Image (cartoon, rainbow, N blue to C red):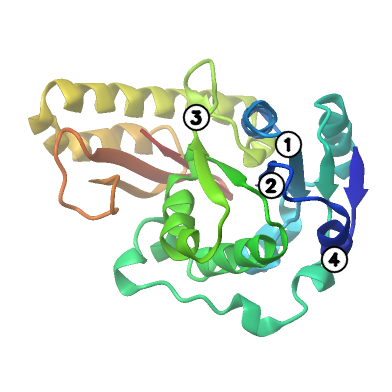
């Protein structure tokens, strides 16, 4: 496993013609990340993992400071997985030119997380575009837990680069609560309540598939979930193809963002 701290060194030393898979992460690796890495290793000759906590995608500086970091443990996990390359760039290395970061969302895309976290996806798009300009990987692997993020990256960046985006299924604890780096902040009680919330959403999703008229019960579901957490930021049913509100039995998806104290979590079914 070769560790690069400079994106230029990586670009100069890695042969990207050799079918390289790229897994971008913010570290604090969990089973969701591990699943993406394993898929990359199966599909590609070489796998590159980046670890970079991107300050521009945090709309609260305190949230950025508190984001879980454990580089030593992350590198241990990656070595065990026999990852070929790891990129751990500095903020200065990524943000050499400020104009690289100017990607604006269209008004119709400012829904769900982008409505409540202004500047978040602009920050994500900025850093991913910098990565893809320099990392000529054949595939980039992203998890469906961050469904809106994958949608936004596809919409704004996929045609600009040759790297093909592969979205992979959400990895869940006991087929319920999704793995997330932020789960590290949860008490046992809140973790168990997270499981209950995911179970409620999963059941609701299945009920809608069986009887689409049950979408009208979203207020009852909101009331149920609000008893299990500190507050719900949003709970919406949208079209998974364009995130619009024109939904039917085949295209609907349930999206949620909620809090346990100061810990913000998202999920979708």
Q: Which residue is label 3 attached to?
A: 194
Task: Return the disc, 4 or 1, that comes first in the chain's sequence.
Answer: 4
Q: Earlier in the sequence, mark 3 or mark 2?
A: 2
Mark found first going from the N terminus, 4 or 2: 4
Disc with the residue nearer the chain's start (1 vs 3)? 1
Q: Indicate left or right for 114 with 173 as reference.
A: left
Q: Which residue is mark 1?
A: 29
Q: Position of residue 10 (x, y in %)?
A: 85, 57
Quadrant in which residue 228 is drawn? top left
Give SS at disc 1.
Answer: loop
Q: Do residues under tags 3 and 2 come within 8 Å of each other at their CB atoms?
A: no
Q: In what element is the residue under mark 4?
A: helix
Q: How far is mark 4 from mark 2, CA to CA?
A: 19 Å
| Residue 128 sits in quarter | bottom right
Q: Where residue 225 is drawn, which disc sits there?
A: none
Q: Residue 108, percent across and down? A: 29, 68
Estimate how packed mark 2 is, as few (under 14), some (14 to 19) or many (20 or more) residues with alpha carbons within 10 Å: some
* First reached walking from the N terminus: tag 4 or tag 3: 4
Which residue reaches farthest front? 17
Helix, strand or loop at disc 2?
strand
Q: Are marks 4 and 2 in contact (CB under 8 Å)?
A: no
Q: Quadrant of the C terminus?
A: top left
Residue named by callout 4: 8
Q: Residue at x 75, y 74 (%)?
A: 95
* Front label number (4 vs 3): 4
Image side of residue 93 versus residue 193, left or right: right
The disc placed on residue 25 is 2
- Left-right relation of 140 to 198: right
Residue closer to the observer: 96 or 197: 96
């Amino acid at each position: 496993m070769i560790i690069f701290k400079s994106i230029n060194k990586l670009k100069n030393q890695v042969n990207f013609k050799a079918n390289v898979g790229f897994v971008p992460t913010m570290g604090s690796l969990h089973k969701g990340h591990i699943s993406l890495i394993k898929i990359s290793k199966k599909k590609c000759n070489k796998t590159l993992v980046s670890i970079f906590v991107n300050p521009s995608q945090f709309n609260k500086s305190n949230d950025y400071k508190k984001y879980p970091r454990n580089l030593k443990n992350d590198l241990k996990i990656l070595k065990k997985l026999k990852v070929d390359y790891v990129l751990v760039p500095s903020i200065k290395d990524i943000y050499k030119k400020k104009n690289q970061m100017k990607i604006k969302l269209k008004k119709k895309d400012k829904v769900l997380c982008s409505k409540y976290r202004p500047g978040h996806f602009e920050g994500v798009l900025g850093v991913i575009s910098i990565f893809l300009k320099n990392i000529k990987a054949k595939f980039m692997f992203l998890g469906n837990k961050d469904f809106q993020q994958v949608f936004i990256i596809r919409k704004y960046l996929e045609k600009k680069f040759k790297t093909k985006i592969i979205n992979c299924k959400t990895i869940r604890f006991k087929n319920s609560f999704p793995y997330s780096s932020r789960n590290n902040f949860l008490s046992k009680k809140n973790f168990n309540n997270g499981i209950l919330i995911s179970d409620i959403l999963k059941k609701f999703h299945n009920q809608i598939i069986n009887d689409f008229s049950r979408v009208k019960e979203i207020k009852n579901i909101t009331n149920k979930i609000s008893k299990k957490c500190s507050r719900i930021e949003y709970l919406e049913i949208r079209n998974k193809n364009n995130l619009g509100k024109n939904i039917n039995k085949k295209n609907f998806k349930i999206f949620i963002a909620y809090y346990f104290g100061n810990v913000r979590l998202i999920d979708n079914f």
